[in-house]
Amino acid sequence: MKTNVGGIDRALRILAGVLLVALAAFGVIGPWGWIGVVSIATGLFRFCPLYPLLGINTCPMSKKN
């Protein structure tokens, strides 16, 4: 797996995932909030399986010498 989730994207995914899971755990939004686990995982692993299908990559490109 090549990383395709960049820094800001990663932080937003983890933050949104934690928020969704917390809201689901407290019963505010119901069981659909547990989908935040997927967001947390894609942020932690820095890979989103949907991005290659859509041709998206938010990682900064490495400089070649």
Image (cartoon, rainbow, N blue to C red):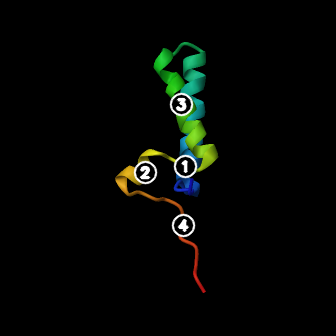
Instruction: Give the secondary structure at mark 4.
Output: loop
- Work out whether mark 4 precedes mark 2 in sequence or the reverse, and give the earlier one: 2
User: Which residue is denoted by mark 1 in the rendering?
Assistant: 47
Which amino acid is tagged 3? Gly
Whether residue 29 appears in this view of the structure is: no
Is 10 displayed left or right of 52 in the figure? right
- Work out whether mark 3 precedes mark 1 in sequence or the reverse, and give the earlier one: 3
Instruction: Give the secondary structure at mark 1.
Output: loop
Q: Nearer the viewer, mark 3 or mark 1?
A: 1
- Work out whether mark 1 precedes mark 4 in sequence or the reverse, and give the earlier one: 1
Foreground pick, 28 / 62: 62
Which amino acid is tagged 2? Tyr
- Work out whether mark 2 precedes mark 3 in sequence or the reverse, and give the earlier one: 3
State if disc 2 and disc 1 touch (CB < 8 Å): yes
Instruction: Give the secondary structure at mark 2.
Output: helix
Is 53 displayed left or right of 35 in the figure? left
User: Which residue is denoted by mark 3 in the rendering?
Assistant: 36
Quarter of the picture containing the C terminus is bottom right
Identify the residue at image location x=53%, y=28%: 20
